Amino acid sequence: MPKRRRSTEDYIVGWVCALPIELAAAAQMLDEEHEDPPPDRTDNNLYTLGRIGYHNVVIACLPAGQIGTNSAAAVAMQMKSRFRSIRFSLLVGIGGGVPTADSDIRLGDVVVSQPHMQHGGVVQYDLGKTEVDGHYTRTGFLNTPPTVLLNALAKLQANHYRGRTSLPTYLLAFDALPAFRREKAGADILFQPIYNHAGGATCEYCSREKLVERAPRTSQEVVLHYGTIASGNQVMKDGVTRDRLNAELGGVLCFEMEAAGLMNNFPCLVIRGICDYADTHKNKEWQPYAAATAAACGKEILSVIPAADVAQAQTVDQVIAVTPAPCLLPFGKNPHFVGRETQLKTLETSLSSTEDFQQLAIWGLGGCGKTAIALEFAYRIKEKYPGRAVFWIPAISRDSFEKAYRDIGTVLDIPGVTDDKADVKRLVKTRLDNEDFGEWLMIVDNADDLDILFEKLDDSSNTARLFDYLPRSRKGSIVFTTRTRKAAVYQVDNNILALGELSEVEAKEVLGKRLIQKNQLNDNKVVHEFLKLLAFLPLAIVQAVAFLNENDIQISEYISLYKDTEENRLDLLSQDFEDQTRYRETKNPVAITWYISFEQIQKQDPLAADYLSFMACVARESIPTSLLPSERSTITQKKAIGTLTAYAFVVSRQQPQKQEQEAVVGEACFDVHRLVHLATRNWLRSHGQWPVWINKAMMRLVDIVPFGDHETREVWVAYLPHAIHVATLPDLPKTEAWTSLLDRIGGCQDSLGQYKAAEGTHQQILRIRRKDLGKQHPDTLISMNNVAQALSDQGKYIEAEKMHQETLALRKKVLGTEHPDTLVSMDNIAQALGSQGKYVEAEKMHRETLALDKKVSGAEHPGTLISMNNIALVLSGQGKYVEAEKMHREELALRKKVSGIEHPHTLISMSNIGLALNGQGKDVEAEKMHQETLALRKKVLGTEHPDTLVSMSNIARALNSQGRYIEAEKMHRETLALRKKVSGAEHPDTLISMNNVALALSGQRKYVEAKKMHQEELALRKKVSGTEHPHTLISMNNMALVLSDQGKYVEGAEMHQETLALRKKVLGTEHPDTLISMSNLAIALSDQGKYVEGAEMHQETLALRKKVLGTEHPDTLISMSNLAIALSGQGKYIEAEKMHRETLALRQKVLGTEHPDTLKSMRNVARVLSKARNDEVSVS
């Protein structure tokens, strides 16, 4: 019968084969064969035409010897150009099976491509980047088969479940062709993957001991398998590689070489008869039968598709017009990605225009998620704009860049791209530069190394740089990711998206997405601490969660491990983990990614590397520029710091977090990233550089840190945290330089009022000096003196006195009785005695010191004048204000003569005279003296010097004593503000000012405000000095007084009781402060109407004050006055009057007739007489 001729428009199904044997099998399936089409000079294909069922089919075979994805694509493209009515195609032939426990694939079985997991039915396994072990990681995705074919598969499978199959019938057509029969194929044997073929055309020489035992099939029926087919340009013939790729790709059923060339440009279904197991035992014995089973399957699929469905389907050209554009991405969509919505919106907004070329760089610290956000953005673009092509270029190396371009050229089917001599980069650029190509997005990832993108590839060319091969089209956009700002600027100028750490909410979402034990997220405090330790850095969080999941431990356990030792922290940050969204050849641990950056910095900017090494040794926050090793060129220094900020290793600190840590005014400060700081130390250790750099840091600090004087305060407050950090490094050798650094730290801590810390530092120095220099060395004795002073500053007066006594004894022995240092120790003992209220002993010691000072140094020596000042102060402590004033004036006269009127020591003498006048009740004169002192101090020392602020405080106190409370409050508040600025909110002097403000408020009867201020001050006292420090107890006393002023007598009394108990414990029963508490408690009892108890307490206080302070001490006279008031409260007016008159007489004698306390006694006498008369009138 002659063959029919039909129009090319009549053919609606394409059928592509790779081998002649496949073509023969396909032709055998035709129900009717048609006449060949007329020749066409533009079409090199040879076609076999015919009908299968209701469908006219056109069959084409690849040219002999030209197999692979490119040849398949070329044949398919010419077929669809010639036969424009084709709706879809079948790619039918043979393939290598992948037998697994899940898929019992046998030779002669058929595999049909069907979407599975993340694949569309076919995956191109060799489209991607070459790994270190020689295999590929895919970077592209292929389309799924058309819906009409997927529907046919569903119906076919349903038929098979019901036992309805035509395969055996269709296979009968091959009975006339003996070569295609099953019995001709031979035995179906499978060898172990690791066992290689022993040689020969067949496996007759291979060991049967290496066979895989499989249960025999009950029948010889052909089994169909549905799932993913792996396609590539190389023959798969290695069992180990086959199984590894199967695992990496998530499970494939067979390997072949043509499908990837068709899927994106020629909608088709792939059908493969299994002819071997894709291993070294591959041969051709099963090829004919496998081709026959595949062809029979193809015919059965067509038989279940109604002709009407095919007629209604779109043609290939119509499908391609709406088919998603090419998308080459190295990783699947990250199911764990969360957050970064603001940045993603910025990306989309910045790159939304298709009217002009757009480019942007994502810049941030290694591990902050640059690749992750770029990948998420790419997938969102792919989903939102299917017609926009998406490409990914790993700029890790020149090879990875060029491999990505070759992949793009392959996917785009650019003519000539497969030629070994082709300039692939130029071909790809030319294609994407052409606006006819359409819209595209290109991600250039890891563009950190400027040498890779910007160095010339060929010295003879002026433009041969990889960067020059990046396309520029009005319809295109490029996103770079880089960990260095310098690279970002080179790439895109100023269109940079800086990517920082995650917000806490985002970080918690990342944790929640990956953590197995979700219940741990309920502990917000632990989660916050965990995320803070990891600096809210995405890679660090992912790495830590992997550790949690793999080891089944709690977040709290991880925190404990992390905090335990620095070695633990480094170990945790260096733990490797599996991440499907990171390149295989790159190391995943966060610490490793920074080592790479650090080595790049060493190569690019050695000074920057030195600075980072130095910064790793000091505290990581608030590093002043002046702390860094000196560099002659300011420009070189700025460039080095710029390099570190460009890598986001350090950031500029705009505002210091704490006043105490401010740097020199106007100086730039920097913070090192928390985890980078840790990782850099480990890098230095691993390279043997740690001892070198910590010694450099120590020597630098010894050179620049002063001893804590006010004049250099702005300098040393910035350096102190770094000095402490370096001095406490466990690896630092305990040299003389280390001791010198500690000495400076101790002096600074003293000046800051950090007395407990200062004691610890001085004790450390003392232990070292005793060991290295001996107990009697002068430097050891200086350390003993410093420890004693720190104890005294903490209110530990007894311990301080003991230490001073030991120092004095040693100084007398070593230096002699009259040595200046010996006299200093005598003075210090006297001050310790005075602090304990032992004024008589203190005065005696001071006078002995004065006598020796005069003998040794002369009457006008500064040391002698200090001794005079100390005697005057102890006289004031005894209430001998007139004598004290006289001594201060003598000292002042000598100071003016020796040092001049404006010398700071002269001004101290003037200030002390003012205080002595205060003690005498001469508040107006005192105020005048303090005003003069203040004016001179402002002139000489400056407005913010601590001594200037003392004068301001003294003026305010004088105003308060005059009842000018509003003026006093204003002055105290000014002083308080300046002390907070100069010394910090927690300095003891600042707390004194807070107390003074509260007292001025009480004087105005603003008790609520006063109480609030006292409470704040008391809380700070407890925090800074401890519950039992004498200054804390003063604050408690003042709080009790304001409670009583509010009429809360019970609460006031309870507070006084508590204060009294603590003062007895800390200071002793007879200390003047203890007696103040007794007096105040007695008053509080009287205020409650408990006059008897109050009187008894006053009697006890009076007796102790007479014993300790003497009969005429002002405090003793206060007790007498208080006792008289208590007696009056009991109606004992005669006894009260007598006591008031005795008090009046003594006050007139001691304080003078015009002293406020004397005048108060006069009023008390008058008041008690008035009460007595009133009571007499009432009785009569």
Image (spheres, rainbow, N blue to C red):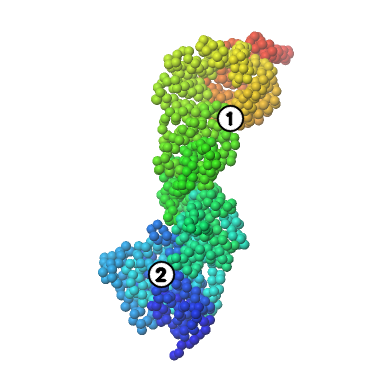
Res 184 → quadrant: bottom left
Residue highlighted by disc 2: 256
Furthest-front residue in view? Answer: 460
- Residue nearest the observer in this picture, 330 or 988: 330
Quarter of the image for the N terminus: give it.
Answer: bottom left
Q: Is residue 721 visible?
A: yes
Q: Amino acid at mark 1?
A: Ser
Secondary structure under the numbered disc 1 in the rendered image: helix
Q: Amino acid at mark 2?
A: Glu
Q: Residues within 10 Å of mark 1 (few under 14, many from 20)?
A: many
The location of residue 173, given as percent across then percent down, is 39, 82
The location of residue 277, given as percent across then percent down, is 35, 68
The location of residue 150, given as percent across then percent down, is 49, 72
Residue at screen point 49% across, 16% down:
820
Res 776 → quadrant: top left
Quarter of the image for the C terminus: give it.
Answer: top right
Q: Does residue 26 appear to the left or right of 440 in the view shown?
A: left
